[in-house]
Amino acid sequence: MMETVEHKRHEMHYQGRVQGVGFRYTVRQIAASFAVTGYVRNLPDGRVQLVVEGQGREIQRFLAEVQSHLGRHIADTQATVSPASAAFLGFEIRF
């Protein structure tokens, strides 16, 4: 029996001191070590939006690494999980 691998999409909103501290560049650097796609961008209200797609376990490992590196800047996190859209070819910073 073949095991199916479900791809997911996590949309994260980080609040705190997350702009002006290299947050987006660090997230992009971390993403390069994982099999994930998506983007990270600053929002006008001071939050950072992270959209990531991949296998559920890989996303969890990626998000744990983001938390490990940047947790000191994050005061609050909101997350939404949905099926992957397969709309991304890589991981990028959006402006």
Image: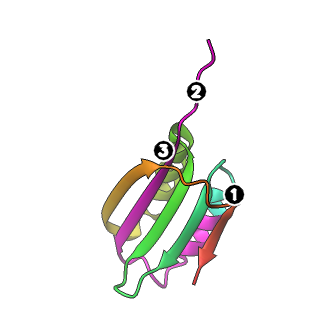
Q: CA distance from mark 1 to mark 3?
A: 15 Å
Look at label 3 and name its amino acid.
Gln
Tell me if 23 is positioned left or right of 48 in this view. Answer: right
Look at label 1 and name its amino acid.
Ala
User: Label 3, on which residue?
Assistant: 60
User: Label 1, on which residue?
Assistant: 32
* Residue 7, numbered circle: none
User: Label 2, on which residue?
Assistant: 4
| SS state under label 1 | loop
Q: Residue at x 62, y 66 (%)?
A: 28
Q: Nearer the viewer, residue 66 or 47?
A: 47
Mark 2 nearby-residue class (10 Å; few <14, some 14–19, many ≥20): few
Q: CA distance from mark 2 to mark 1?
A: 24 Å
Find the magenta span and give its range.
Answer: 1-28
Which of the 4 image quadrants contains residue 5?
Answer: top right
* Closer to viewer: mark 3 or mark 2: 2
Mark sitting earlier along the chain (2/1): 2
Mark sitting earlier along the chain (3/2): 2
Q: CA distance from mark 3 to mark 2?
A: 18 Å
| SS state under label 3 | helix
The image shows residue 95, relative to residue 82, as above or below, that is below
Q: Quadrant of the C terminus?
A: bottom right
